[in-house]
Amino acid sequence: MSSKQAKFFESVQHNFDRAASYTDIHPGLLAQIKVCNAVYQMNFPVKIGDSYEVIEAYRVQHSHHRLPTKGGIRFSHLVDQEEVMALAALMTYKCAIVDVPFGGAKGGVKVSPRAYTAEELERITRRYTVELIRKNFIGPSIDVPAPDYGTGEREMAWILDTYQTFKGGEIDATGCVTGKPVRQNGIRGRTEATGRGVFYGLREVYNEEKMLKRIGATKGLAGKTMVIQGMGNVGSYTGLISQNEGDVKIIGLSEIEGTIYNEKGIDMQAALDYRAANGTIIGLPGSTSLPNRGDWVGIECDILVPAALESVITEDNAHLVKAKVIGEAANGPITSKAADIIIKNGSIIIPDMYLNAGGVTVSYFEWLKNLSHMRFGRMDKRFNHNTYENIVSTFENLTGKTVGNKEREFITRGAEEVDLVRSGLEETMINSFYQIMEVYHGNKKIKNLRDAAFVTALNKVASDYMTLGVFP
Ligand code: GLU
């Protein structure tokens, strides 16, 4: 058992137990919530070059209290059963926190995507999907995968196509997977969703008076400094949106090749372009490279955002953290022992199960779009536009003045799909934040936000089980 993954699984279990002790949920029900309901490990052959490779893969359904189950598929050479189980459990709590009516699941394929060609990855993805179909582990009402570390819309398109090949007659087949390309039944705003959700979550933290008092910070995100570890989908959009819409100053970025720093601020788009062109962030004009790749942890900043893999902040480096706010954009980046150290040192951790829930929230919207067979906004966009036009014209007639073209366009615009997705996501992140705050401020025993988020989730899952009549 590799120690990082084992630590991660232990951390999730440990956090569960502590949060559970703050609830009055029946121990029998807690035991049912804690375990993974179904674990499917598979080994299948795939032709790679002239020979065959046996690929190890998993799909774990943590909780069936709501169906379908939901969660991404990870492609990484570090995948193992403990890791996928921990990630599946986190999905259950995440969905509960943001009121997405799904159980939690997760998939993992033990491959390093960089070691294969696109064609080989396609073969692996399609074969994995066939294994899921054969065991009834995928379907719009059964279990709905999505992107995760090492996968994206390309893999989701392959999954959909494979599923449709077998189940083309199912009227809701397109809802068998989310995070699909927009032209293949995906939804606008899904790719940026996790990063956008991280931004909305952090914005709420910096709006809440008691939180600000606790960390001794001024109100609002504008001007706050941020360091991001990981420039994949989540890290990139967190950086871009925080910078462009929140006026956050990004002063440090870390990737596999190393960590760069610029106290005057790094333009996120320039850093992404530079990395795309050069294959590295090292050497980005204006920035200095820090001696060790792990140095991102100790950079002095307001907000530290680990946005890659689990267990990157452990009891070995937690004492180096200087940020007052650590936003868990990744799943499980801070081990439970590290969290104790960070909190003792006076910082706060915005927990993954809340902060990175934007992805699954918009996946839910995509699934709803697939089941309704219609794009959001199709029915009402034009109607709203015409109504607003009439209002503006009426005011113009009454006042004898005319509104400028730009203002008119702004006022009379009907919402497009992407506007509705963003507004639904924003509403969700705000709402869930205050649900967690209510638990945090309402129970003296609860001392940190992870426990508050966990308790919020556990109470919802427990109440679902009771409604089902499984537990009295
Ligand atoms: N993989 C993402 C997560 O960890 C998204 C899951 C989904 O959209 O189902 O939350």
Image (cartoon, helix red, strand yellow):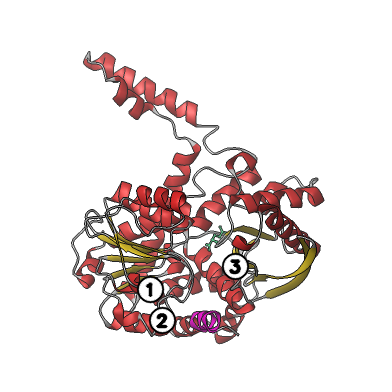
Q: Label 3: few (<14), some or many (≥20) within 10 Å?
A: some
Q: Label 1: few (<14), some or many (≥20) within 10 Å?
A: some
Q: Mark 2 vs mark 3: which is more N-terminal?
A: 3
Q: What residue is disc 1 on? A: 294
Q: Label 2: few (<14), some or many (≥20) within 10 Å?
A: many
Question: Relative to 42, is 286 on the left or the right?
Answer: left
Q: Mark 1 vs mark 2: which is more N-terminal?
A: 1
Give whichever of 311, 35 is nearer the camera. 311
The reply to whether the C-beta atoms of the residues labelled 1 and 2 are less than 8 Å apart is no
Secondary structure type for disc 3: loop
Q: What residue is disc 3 on? A: 76
Q: What residue is disc 2 on? A: 314
Q: Is residue 433 above or below residue 88?
A: above
Write the start and end of the magenta stretch as one range: 3-13
Q: Look at label 1 and name its amino acid.
A: Gly
Residue 6 shown in magenta: yes
